[in-house]
C-alpha cells in the first residue's frame, strides 16, 4: 500500500494542515486510495477532512491524475511544509510532485514510523482531540483497523482480509505530520528517524 502526506506549520497561511493519502491494492478492481486533510489547531485539536478514490470498474485502474490534481489544489490552498508518502505504490506521484518543487519525503509503513503514528492517533482519539466530519467510508475503514504488537510497540493493522484500512493509516500519518509541523513551527528542532 502507498501513502502520501503533506503538512504546514503554524506560521503559514493555513496553520497546521496535513494531507495524507493511503492507497490499497489487492486487485485492480478493488484498488482504493484515501486522502486526508488534517489540521492541528492552537488548542491541540485535530480537524480532518477526507476524499476517497477507487479504481474505475470498467478499466480496473485508479486515475492518479485526479489524486495528483487534488494534492496540487490542496498545496495551492495551504502552504504545505512537507509531502510524505509510502514509496511502495505511489512512487510516480511522489516523483512528479518532487519535480514540481514539492517538499517530498518518505513515510514508509514500517514499525519505526507507524508505531509512534498509531500511538499518537490513539492518544488524540482517547483525549477527544479529533474532530471529524461524517464520512461512512472513513468510519468503515477505521473500524476495520485493529492493532498488532511489534518489537517497537503496537501499530495499526487490518482486522480482516476483505476490508481496507486506508483511512485509518492516512489519518494516523496526517495527525503525526501535523503534530511534527506544529512542533517545528516554534523553531529549529532535531528529528531523528
Image (cartoon, rainbow, N blue to C red):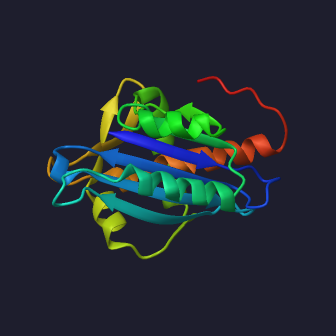
Viewer-closest of 183 and 18 = 18
Q: Position of residue 139 (x, y in %)?
A: 34, 67
The answer to whether 101 is drawn above or below residue 41 in the figure is: above
Q: Quadrant of the C terminus?
A: top right
Please state which of residues 175 and 32 is positioned toward the viewer in this rendering.
Answer: 32
Q: Residue 67: where, in percent of width, then height?
A: 44, 54
Quarter placement of the N terminus:
top left
- Residue name at image x 70 percent, y 50 percent: 8
Question: Does residue 114 show up?
Answer: no
Image location (x, y in percent) of residue 125: 49, 59
Q: Is residue 35 visible?
A: yes
- Side of 39 where 48 appears, left or right: left
- Which residue of the protein is positioned furthest toward the bottom in this rendering? 134
Rendered image quadrant of residue 35: bottom left
Which residue is at a point 67% across and 62% down the rendered structure image?
Answer: 77
Residue in the image at 18% along x and 52% along y: 60
The structure residue drawn at horizontal position 36% and vertical position 31%, both measured from the top left corner, is 88
Horizontal arrangement in the rendering, residue 88 relative to residue 75 (left or right): left
Left-right relation of 13 to 164: right
Amino acid at each position: 500500500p502507498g501513502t502520501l502526506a503533506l503538512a504546514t506549520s503554524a506560521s503559514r497561511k493555513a496553520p497546521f494542515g496535513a494531507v495524507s493519502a493511503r492507497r490499497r491494492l489487492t486487485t485492480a478492481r478493488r484498488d482504493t486510495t484515501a486522502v486526508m486533510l488534517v489540521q492541528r489547531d492552537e488548542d491541540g485539536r485535530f480537524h480532518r477532512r477526507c476524499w476517497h478514490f477507487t479504481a474505475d470498474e470498467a478499466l480496473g485502474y485508479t486515475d492518479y491524475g485526479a489524486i495528483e490534481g487534488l494534492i496540487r489544489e490542496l498545496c495551492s490552498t495551504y502552504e504545505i511544509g512537507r509531502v510524505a508518502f509510502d514509496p511502495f505504490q505511489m512512487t510516480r506521484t511522489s516523483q512528479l510532485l518532487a519535480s514540481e518543487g514539492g517538499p517530498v519525503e518518505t513515510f514508509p509503513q514500517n514499525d519505526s514510523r507507524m508505531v509512534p503514528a498509531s500511538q499518537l492517533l490513539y492518544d488524540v482519539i482517547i483525549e477527544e482531540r479529533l474532530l471529524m466530519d461524517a464520512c461512512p467510508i472513513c468510519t468503515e475503514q477505521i473500524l476495520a483497523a485493529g492493532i498488532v504488537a511489534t518489537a517497537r510497540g503496537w501499530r495499526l493493522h487490518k482486522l480482516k482480509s476483505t476490508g481496507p484500512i486506508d483511512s485509518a493509516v492516512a489519518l494516523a500519518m496526517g495527525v503525526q505530520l501535523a503534530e511534527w509541523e506544529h512542533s517545528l513551527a516554534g523553531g529549529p528542532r532535531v528529528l531523528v528517524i
